[in-house]
Amino acid sequence: MSDARRRLGAVRQSRNDIENHIIDEYAAGRIGRREFFRRGSVAGMSLPLLSLIAAACGSSSSSATTSAASTGAAPTTTAAGGQPGGTVRLSVLKPSNPVDPVLANNTGSIVLLQFTGEFLTLDEDKQLKPWLAESWTSNPDASEWTFKIKTGVTFNDGSPMTAKDVAASFNRLADPKNKSNALSTLGGVLSPGNATAPDDTTVVFKLDAPNGSFPYYTSNDNYNAIILPAAYAGDFTKTFPGTGPWKVASYNDGVSASFVPNPTYWGTKALPAKLEITIHPDEATAITALQGGQVDIVQQVSVANSQAILNDPSYKILSIKASTHRELSMRNDKPPFTDKRVRQAIALTLDRPAIVQGLFQGRADVGNDSPFAPVFAQTDTSIPQRVQDIAKAKQLLKDAGHEGGFETLLVGVDQQEIKQYAQLVADSAKQIGVKISLKIEGGDVYYGNTFGSSDWLDSIMSLVDYGHRGVPNVFLTAPLQTTDTKKGTGPWNAAHFANPAFDKMVSDYIAAVDLQGQQKLAGQIQTLLLDETPIVYAYFYDYLTATTAKVNGLRVSAMSQVWPDQVTLR
């Protein structure tokens, strides 16, 4: 037996059942190297350990990453270079509600939270990496997860961060009394009080049900989950409390902000001397500011609104293949959409490849009316793709008693390409005699002050934006599970979809810890959603950030986060 095999045997003796199952799947060739590292990181295995196991199983390389050049993937960081110091200027979209970790639900708020706030884990490059957590493990059925918390970390007011702050942060988000936006993620997953800190470096999460992907719920995917002091009581923008590399210098609500390096930061210190934020009302204004030299970075741009800079060498475009998408929901409890044949007919009018090319110039993937995007390893790619079929759509309407068509209203949010997509939906529906009137609203009106009383949840047809997630769990639960305010399920269910068979499949899927089991259940879910069609998923688009050519060292995520702390300018 080789030394590598002996080491593997020793490793296996100290791993739990879930981790050994992942090792077996890789050793048997049922999952590839990249998926092995992804799933191993979720289970809590460290990068050196995964590299050792890969080598013992016969892998030709001990590196856990694959370069963008070798995969053809676009970069998610700008290259290093330039000199530290100076001022980095970033454009952020105007938040549509108060900037608060408990309430934030939009791209402007998300990015303002994470300059000073940090997460337990980081979803980056299709791997889950430690951040404020050093390691994590689960019990055999993944219903309880234990996290070891990094020591020597302080908040930016100088007070130490301990496991008690971590537990309090999650209990705060899980408590319905706080009206947390994170209930869309944690509802039915974690009940208030079930995050505990038995000592200063340990947090135990006792979940409502088994969850094989729970560490993702502690990452930047769950953008509300920055770690705050246990005593936090609101008024976030007064001091911007957190453990991150920046401290707030000034904040002018809805207009601007500035940050300076946090001198007591536990990690690599920020390189810029100052970070200046300009808050813009829309993407077009932000791009104009980039072209005019007023800002160096625009948080997010779209193909539809950034034609002037997309192919200009004066600018850099960071691009991430993502699960970011739009959801076209139809009220399953309101005629004519109570009949699934009507919903199917609407879906069949769309020419999806043409939409991907027309709105995104190919920077998107075609959707198949479920939230299982091509970027997810769990997606069952054998499910037949829905294609445009006008004759079939007309026949479905006729069979449903609507041969002459009908009139309805679609309410959408005015963001990026959504207005153009809404018009394409309306134009496509005309081919089968359906007249869709459009009402496109600003985010403050569309989302309202609280979820549950907003236009998009009450409209007979709605079109909403959804940010990227590293696993599809939130996409399956928040907009599709049967709404139950007591359990906290289905808070974003604009389609008012209620299907017990679907709910059971999703619960089983979330509990599954092996890829094969997830893919089998994913196929069943995808098939059910194609038949029911409560929501149309026409595409999943690439996430784009724009900078001037002089920006180096910027990191971004498809969840709208921007990390400028290692940026240099040249």
Image: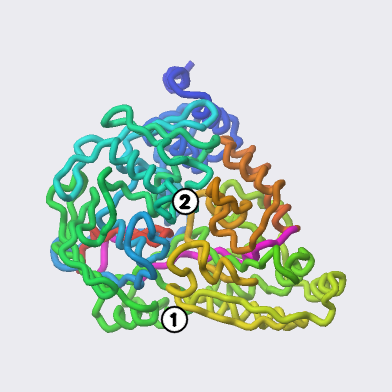
Q: Tell me if mark 1 has few (under 14), some (14-19) or many (20+) residues whose alpha carbon lies within 10 angstroms of its own.
A: few
Q: Which of marks 1 and 2 is nearer the N terminus?
A: 2
Point out the stretch of residues depicted in magenta. 532-555
293 shown above or below 61: below
Residue 513 makes an appearance in the image: yes
Identify the residue at image location x=54%, y=71%.
455
141 shown above or below 528: above
Q: Do the residues labelled 1 and 2 touch (CB within 8 Å)?
A: no
Picture quarter containing residue 534? bottom right
Tally the marks: 2
Q: Is 262 positioned to the left or the right of 505 in the image?
A: left
- Residue 183 disc label: 2
Residue 62 screen position, x and y as percent: 40, 36
**Front-most of 108 and 198?**
198
Q: Which amino acid does label 1 sit on?
A: Gln
Q: Does the magenta stretch include residue 543?
A: yes
- Residue 307 disc label: 1
Q: Tell me if mark 2 has few (under 14), some (14-19) or many (20+) residues whose alpha carbon lies within 10 angstroms of its own.
A: many
215 shown above or below 366: above
Identify the residue at image location x=68%, y=54%.
498
Q: What residue type is labelled 2?
A: Leu
Picture quarter containing residue 205? top left
Q: Is residue 388 magenta?
A: no
Residue 360 screen position, x and y as percent: 53, 73
Residue 230 screen position, x and y as percent: 27, 43
Identify the residue at image location x=23%, y=57%.
240
